[in-house]
Image (tube, helix red, strand yellow):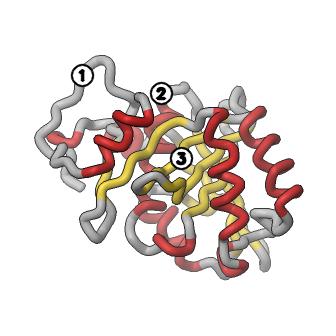
Amino acid sequence: MSTREESAVRSHWDHSSCEGTVDCPPRCPRATDDRGVPFLVRPYRPADFESLVELYDSLDESAATMGLPPFTRPRIEAWLAELTSNGWNLIALLDDRTVGHVAVTPADDPDPEFVVFVDTDVQNRGIGGELLKQLIAYADDRDHEALSLDVSTDNRRAVTVYENVGFETIEESALNRTMRLPLDDPIADRVRRPPAERLE
């Protein structure tokens, strides 16, 4: 999809009756946040690197969890270079701005780990939840067996979001918990349905 097409996609649409085609990505890239504002989720491209650096460089310190993301620009750049070269990534675009990112690494692991971050200015609007659904759809499409992540035990909001899509805690300590979602779970099929077939 070209930049011009992306701008048109983000301007406004009602895709609720879309039944999909064989050429569609694993999940429709078009979404609407909880305020009715359209946004787009698509695979990362090398040209997106600087906008990702900007996203992380602008995050409030309260967005950090378990030492991520790093706080200096050089460390952010090094961390993102590692994520984008060893894994696969999706970004969320609102207007012409990158407002969300999910990274999965290593790309060839049947049970990879992931991180997901959303711009502080647009949190609590459903963008993170949509990124998780996109993540599950793409991971299933890539034949991963499961997805795992470590999350701070005191980050109840994140834990609740992960539990709501089906992640279960498989290990817990005083500081963090490891959560896992097997992709044979029915959620993998549900998130891949075209908009016309969704009950979300």
Q: Is residue 189 visible?
A: no
Mark 2 or 3, nearer chain start: 3
Specify whether 12 is left or right of 125: left
Of the 4 image quadrants, the one containing the C terminus is bottom left
Three-letter code, disc 1: Thr
- Mark 2 near mark 3, Cβ–Cβ under 8 Å? no
The residue carrying mark 3 is 91
Q: Nearer the viewer, mark 1 or mark 3?
A: 3
Q: Is residue 108 above or below residue 112?
A: above
Residue at the top extreme, as displayed: 22
Depth check, front residue: 37 or 163: 37
The nearer-to-camera label among 2 and 3 is 3
Amino acid at circle 3: Ile
* Dot 1 or dot 2, earlier in sequence: 1
Residue 21's tag is: 1
Q: CA distance from mark 1 to mark 2?
A: 15 Å
Q: Of the residues shown, which amino acid type is indicated by label 2?
A: Asp
- The answer to whether residue 70 is visible is yes
Q: Residue at 75% across / 42% down in the picture?
A: 83
How many angstroms separate mark 2 from mark 3 (CA)?
Answer: 17 Å
